[in-house]
Amino acid sequence: MFRILAIAAAVAVLAGCAATQSTPPTFSGCKTWEQQAGSPHLVSVAVLSPELAKVIGVQEVSTARTGTGMAAVQTTVYNCSDVDVVLTMRTRFTGNRGQSEPPSAWKTVFLTPRGQATYGESAISQATDKVAVDINDGNRGQSQFAPGQSYVIPAK
C-alpha cells in the first residue's frame, strides 16, 4: 500500500511540473517567427497573428521580375509544430508614389506537421517595384488554437 501511495505522489509531482501553453509546442532547433522578427532579409514579411508567430517560421523571401517586367515575390514558410496549421497570405504592392495596386486576395496555405509550403504572387502594374507579404491565421483572424485549449510542453 505504501509503495502505491509513493508512486501516486511521484506521478502527481511530475504532473505538476508539466507546463502548458495555448499553442502547440515546437520541435527543437526550429526557428519561429517570434525568434526571426526583425531579421533584415525578412523586413517585407508581417505575421499578423501572435499565435502563429509562435509556431511558424519564414525560410526565405525572394523577389524578381517576370518575363513581362512585373514584380513577383515567393515566400517559403514552415511549420515548427507537430499539428496542421492553416495560413492565409497576401501581397501588398507599392511603387515610388505609394500603393501601386490593391493588395492581392488572401490565399489559403496549408502546412503539414513539420512541413513547408511556398506562396507566390505577381504584380499587374508596371509601377510596382516593392512588395510585402502578410501572413494571417487561416481562421480569418480567430486563432485556430481554440480558446481554453492547451498543449503540454514535453519535459526536457
Image (cartoon, rainbow, N blue to C red):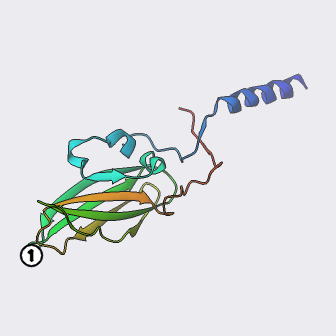
Q: Is residue 20 visible?
A: yes
User: Foreground residue, 8 or 19?
Assistant: 19
Q: Residue at x 74, y 26 (%)?
A: 10
User: Foreground residue, 121 or 60?
Assistant: 121
Residue 77's x, y, as percent?
A: 34, 56
Circle 1 packing at 10 Å, graded few (<14), some (14-19), many (20+), is few
Question: Relative to residue 31, is residue 115 depicted above or below?
Answer: below
Q: Report helix, strand or loop for mark 1.
A: loop
Residue 56's x, y, as percent?
A: 41, 51
Q: Residue at x 21, y 60 (%)?
A: 131
Q: Residue at label 1? A: 67
Q: Quadrant of the N terminus?
A: top right
Q: Is residue 32 visible?
A: no
Question: Relative to residue 123, is residue 36 depicted above or below?
Answer: above
Residue 145's x, y, as percent?
A: 56, 53
Taking the image as shown, residue 39 lies to the left or right of residue 66, namely right
Q: Residue at x 13, y 62 (%)?
A: 129
Residue 75's x, y, as percent?
A: 27, 59
Q: What count of labels does the image hold? A: 1
Query: Can you tell which quarter of the image residue 144 is in?
Result: bottom right
Query: Can you tell which quarter of the image residue 11 is in?
Result: top right
Extreme residue toward the front, this view: 97
Taking the image as shown, residue 151 lies to the left or right of residue 47, namely right
Q: Residue at x 42, y 58 (%)?
A: 136
User: Foreground residue, 76 or 9?
Assistant: 76
Q: Amino acid at mark 1?
A: Gly
